[in-house]
Amino acid sequence: MTQDDIHLEQDGPGSFKFSFSSRRGELSGRVNVGTEGPPDKRSNEDRDQAAKNQVLALSRELGEACGDSMTSKS
C-alpha cells in the first residue's frame, strides 16, 4: 500500500472495511455509508468515494481527538 492510500473492501450493503496508510502509520476499520433512508442508488464509484471521504473525516477527527487529549495533559 502506498502512502496516503485508502484500500476499500465492501462487506455488506453500504458497509466497507478499510485500511488507510500515511507517513505517520496505518488505520483500519469499518465505515458505513448510505445505510439509512431510501435505497442507495449511487454508482459504485460514488459509494466508494463516500466511503473514502468517511475514512478521511474519521482520520482527521481521530487526530484532533488525540491532539486534544495530549494538550489537555500538559
Image (tube, rainbow, N blue to C red):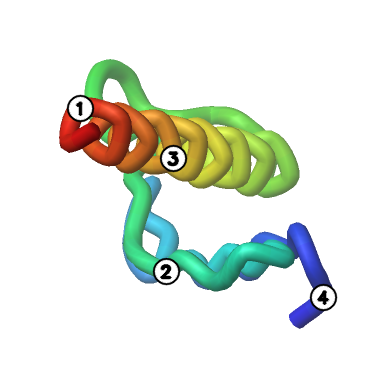
Residue at x-position 74% and y-position 63%: 5
Dots 4 and 1: beta carbons under 8 Å? no
Name the N-terminal-most of marks 4 and 1. 4
Q: Residue furthest left?
A: 73
- The amino acid beneath tag 4 is Thr
Q: Is residue 26 something one can see in this rendering?
A: yes
Quadrant for residue 6, please give it.
bottom right
Q: Callout 3: 10 Å neighbours few (<14), some, many (20+)?
A: few
* Residue type at tag 3: Gly
Q: Which of marks 4 and 2 is nearer the N terminus?
A: 4
Mark whose residue sits in front, 1 or 3: 1
Which residue in the protein does label 4 denote? 2
Q: What residue appears at the point 68 percent right and 35 percent down from the top-left corner?
A: 46
Q: Give the amino acid type for the residue marked by disc 2 in the picture.
A: Ser
| Residue 31, x across and y down, in percent | 36, 50
Q: Is mark 1 on a helix, strand or loop?
A: helix
Provide the residue designation for mark 2.
Answer: 28
- For the residues labelled 3 and 4, the Cα–Cα distance comes to 20 Å
Gap in Å between the C-alphas at discs 2 and 1? Answer: 26 Å
Q: Which of marks 3 and 2 is nearer the N terminus?
A: 2
Q: Is mark 4 on a helix, strand or loop?
A: loop
Q: Is residue 49 depicted above or below 2 in this figure?
A: above
Where is the N terminus found, in terms of image quarters? bottom right
The answer to whether 44 is drawn above or below residue 19 in the figure is above
